[in-house]
Amino acid sequence: MLSVGTQAPNFTLSDKDGTPITLSALRGRKVVLYFYPKDNTPGCTRQACAFAQNYAEFERRGITVVGISKDSVASHQKFAEKYDLPFILLSDPDRTAIEAYGVWQEKKMAGKVGMGVVRTTFLIDENGIITAVMPKVKPDTNAAEILAMTEA
């Protein structure tokens, strides 16, 4: 997994509308880059809804929120519509960004061991440098923790 002070790896992925989004194009703004396992699962839904509830405050602070999972563009579109998610959701079916950020790891689920996305959030500054790494975040408090870290 990447560490604080590292240049955030650049990537280009499709958003929920199929539009390519490149991380470096977001320079000049802080970016919350959060990786999550799957659309429409309980924890991932709570995390996304917490970001949505706090979206106006993130925008006020000049922070772009970006969520990434392996789900398809179509899945992201349905997820965003169902929960009225106003921020960017990116589809990474080939695990380009997921592996570049080191969040594709061995996980234990229901007694079974397998590979998957470990819920992780990165805070990236205006120059593309990682300023915070939050591994294994709690879905319900992740958005509030970031807001507390970025208070002026």
Image: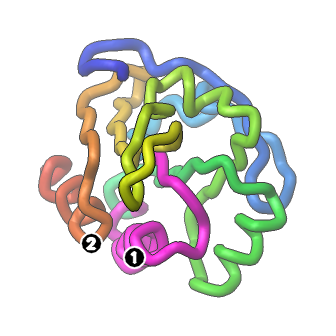
Q: Main secondary structure of the magenta part?
A: helix
C-alpha span from label 2 to label 1: 6 Å
Instruction: Please identify the residue farthest to the front as the structure is shown.
Output: 111
Numbered disc total: 2
Asked if residue 100 lies in the magenta stretch, the reply is: no
Q: Is residue 56 visible?
A: no
Q: Which residue is mark 2?
A: 140
Up/down of 31 relative to 87, above or below: above
Q: Which residue is mark 1?
A: 46
Residue 1 x/y as whole percent:
36, 22
Up/down of 44 relative to 82, above or below: above
Which residues fall within the magenta stretch?
33-59
Q: Residue at x 43, y 34 (%)?
A: 106
Residue 78 x/y as whole percent:
75, 77
Q: Residues within 10 Å of mark 1 (few under 14, many from 20)?
A: some
Residue 42 x/y as whole percent:
44, 77
Q: Residue at x 67, y 27 (%)?
A: 96
